[in-house]
Amino acid sequence: MNQHRLTIHEAHELLKTKKISSVELTKTYLARIAQVEPKVKAFVTVDEDGALQQAKKADELIARGDVFPLTGIPGLIKDNICTRGLKTTCSSKMLENFVPPYNATVIEKLNALGAVIIGKANMDEFAMGSSTENSAFYTTHNPWDVSRVPGGSSGGSAAAVAAGEAVYALGSDTGGSIRQPAGFCSVTGLKPTYGRISRYGLIAFASSLDQIGPLTQDVTDCALVMNAISGHDSRDSTSAPDAVPDFMRCLKTGLKGLRLGIPREYFVEGMQAGVAESVRAAIKKLEELGATINWDISLPHTRYSLAVYYIIAPSEASANLARYDGVKYGFSYQDTQNMWEAMEKTREFGFGPEVKRRIMLGTYALSAGYYDAYYLKAQKVRTIIRQEFDEAFQKVDALITPTSPSVPFKIGEKSDDPLQMYLSDVCTIPINIAGVPAVSIPAGFASSRAESRDSSRAESKDDNLPVGMQVIGKPFGEEIIFQVAYAYQQATDWHKRSPDIS
């Protein structure tokens, strides 16, 4: 077995039985990063010295018998999660040299377990994007086809896990930013219920939508990371006080008695045929595993989700990003005559085009003459969307949809068409608006063409691109989606396949 293909639970057994040390494991992943990072570009920062120091401490814990599932395991952190003493840039020139003086709550939890943080992952600037092409530094490449995007905004996190550069990663999800890249890179990615994981130390994009979550190789690893980072935090006013279950207890192979609904609105017009075929085949497999499938589920206001999102999220972003004025920290443009010009130039040159576009959209939606017409109306529709999910969950235990309407697209293919780029998240955005949990799991491979593959034509690389399936649960219903996702993975091997980028 290649050590850079180990899952968390496999690596944990090797560490616990002392067949390998954390230092040896960490060096293996550092060597893998050196080998493939020139092609993938998943990292903003590789913290070799810090990772090896943490690995030595982890080995001391293991020697004393203090070994937890994440002890000594090298993980990657999205670069909008604060890490004390380690640069946190949000892949933006605005924070290019920012070193936080404190750790996010999720980092504190990982440190307490003796985890190893191997570096910080590239992302769309301030988490605004669906392809990681909006990074101020460089575009991350999809390990399955380096001419294609890995998704976004957590593209670096997903690509690194797929490429074997980290055992697992943390991402953030505002409108699909964990699940869409998980689908594009054929890994497992979970957006928890809003409030399940503390947002303290997560650099805010849209505060009512953002959530931190794991990207892993399989559902078991996902449950292990969720056990480690979930829970109430008094420093986050949106953190839920609900008790956290042991998610490992939810991993059951049978689905008998579970009711799964298929919302008809999610098989959208223009969806690539191979994506629809793969997800329908996965639904059939779930039925074979004992689930009852209900095809008569409707969430009619889903079609308004994209519009609601692109009013609420930019509005919150315009407020959250007002702090970047060149005065307190971050990039500051100096060659000016007065403070007002300095502030304007700082924001002009510190932010990229997509961030500035969303700030302007949000500022417009919040302006005195348009607040009621746009922001207030969007909040009312948001309530209706949430109510429709509540009604659906009275009929079924979980919902099944595609993660994205397409397989990974070419780098540059949608860069000049923001609307087409935004449509990449049409299947994931409603989940953030409703605040419910959802996981994306690998569900096969398909062609990048709109029509089904012609069996008489020779197979090409474009015919073997990842497809993700999304399992959606009711609020704080992660146990059910873990059960569904785990049962599916035990009956299939899509999640065991890995790209060849050597």
Image (cartoon, rainbow, N blue to C red):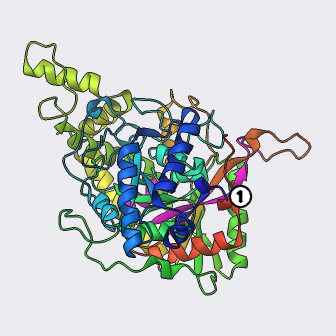
Residue 83 or residue 442, whichever sits in front: 83
Q: Residues within 10 Å of mark 1 (few under 14, many from 20)?
A: many
Which of these two is toward me, 306 or 206? 206
Q: In this view, does 10 lie to the left or right of 310?
A: right
Give the answer, above or below, for where 255 lies relative to 346.
below
Give the percent coordinates (x, y) of residue 101.
18, 47
Residue at (48% x, 71% y) in the render = 473
Q: Where is residue 336 shown, x and y percent of the image?
A: 13, 13
Question: What count of labels does the image hold?
Answer: 1
Residue 482 versus residue 496 in the image, above or below: below
Q: In this view, does 410 lie to the left or right of 96?
A: right
Most extreme residue toward the bottom, as rendered? 257
Query: Looking at the image, which residue sits at the far right?
Result: 456
Q: Can residue 301 be seen in this view?
A: no
Image quadrant holding the N terminus, namely bottom right
Please, which residue is most extreme toward the left here?
Answer: 338
Q: Does the magenta stretch include residue 39?
A: no
Residue at point 45% right, 47% down? 154
**Up-down relation of residue 346 to residue 385 (above or below):** above
Q: What stretch is highlighted in magenta?
A: 429-451
Give residue 357's position: percent from left, percent from top: 34, 31
450 is within the stretch colored magenta: yes
Q: Position of residue 196 (x, y in %)?
A: 33, 68
User: Circle 1 — which element?
Assistant: helix
Name the residue tied to disc 1. Answer: 278
Closest to the observer: 131 or 308? 131
Callout 1, which amino acid?
A: Ser
Dividing the picture into quarters, in which one does residue 435 lie? bottom left
Residue 451 in view in this figure: yes
Give the position of the C terminus as an image quadrant. top right
Instruction: Please give left or right for residue 267 compared with residue 166 in the image.
Output: right
